[in-house]
Image: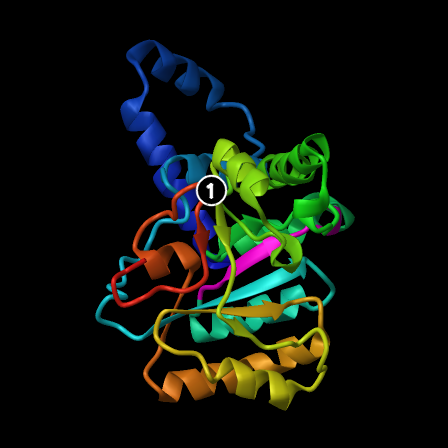
Amino acid sequence: MRVWALPLALVALVSCVTQSVPRRQQARVHTAAARPVVIDPVMLAKRLRAMQPGWPRSRKFDCARLKCVALTFDDGPGEYTWRLLDLLRQRDVRATFFVIGQMVAADKGGRIVRRIVGDGHEIGNHSWSHPPLAELSHEALQKELKHTEDIVRRLTGVRMRVMRPPYGSTDDEVAAETRREGLAQILWNVDTLDWRDRVATTVARRAGEAKPGSIVLLHDIHRTTVEAVPALLDTLGRKGYTFVTVSELYGRTPAPGRTYTERTPTGR
């Protein structure tokens, strides 16, 4: 949700509540109307999202016909994420952010993750501390996923439906646990290697090699990656690509426990 839309959303919310509450509750609302009302913007955002089941609501792109590409950003939120969000907003582009719980906790008050959600991006679980999940005990695996789930849900009100195993480290046990947690495993088929090669032009060139249905791996914790975004958007835009979230790429919420690397011509 855009910041400028908050007052309009508030008016709409108040109207809906007034029209839908029982008569006895209306009386209480009218009695209290004489007192000043203090609105908590965080609670308001949660209530607005609660009115939209299945967040984030898909824009219903037909990626079986369109040339769609899903840009994904790992390991944040970090010091460059806010600038990235500005760039994506300017282009009206939605992406998917796989966040680390410790990084979310370091962002005091959850300012960045709330903006990720408010701007309509998809948010996913990237574990609490970024270990290779396939090497963990069952208890440690559960904690890595659950702690990140809890902090994101507390700060944003959103129940994540996708996750990315750090380093792509997964196995049958990870698949079983993500299935229990209601999380699909999202990998990638285009690796920009932006963590290794901190050169914006190189990152943009590699992202520009995406094909229809690609899931592109990027990291918003690197300044050079954020600097590459305008050029990669221009490159893919000239090729006629539509930028979508992971769920929009598949036209539905991906199935829990299942592993996805790209959308194939058959829609899988």
Instruction: Tell me if 90 is positioned left or right of 244 in this view.
Output: right
Residue 6 point in image, percent of width and height:
47, 50
Tell whether position 179 is magenta. Answer: no
Q: Residue at label 1? A: 257
Tell whether position 98 is magenta. Answer: yes
Please name whichever residue, 228 or 51, is drawn nearer the observer in this view of the structure. Answer: 228
Q: Give the answer, above or below, for where 188 lies relative to 161.
A: below
Q: Quadrant of residue 138?
A: top right
Q: Quadrant of residue 79?
A: bottom right
Please name whichever residue, 23 or 59, is drawn nearer the observer in this view of the structure. Answer: 59
Please name whichever residue, 218 or 11, is drawn nearer the observer in this view of the structure. Answer: 218
For the record, the magenta segment spans: 94-103
Instruction: Tell me if 245 is positioned left or right of 144 in this view.
Output: left
Near mark 1 (Cα within 10 A), the count class, few <14, some 14-19 or many ≥20, is many
Identity of the residue furthest to the front in this view: 172
Q: Which residue lies at the image location 46% right of the left edge and 24% below the top edge?
A: 33
Is residue 220 visible to us here?
A: yes
Q: Which residue lies at the image location 46% right of the left edge and 34% below the top edge?
A: 47
Residue 101 point in image, percent of width and height:
70, 45
Is residue 41 visible to us here?
A: no
The kind of secondary structure element at disc 1 is loop
Residue type of the residue flagged with mark 1: Gly
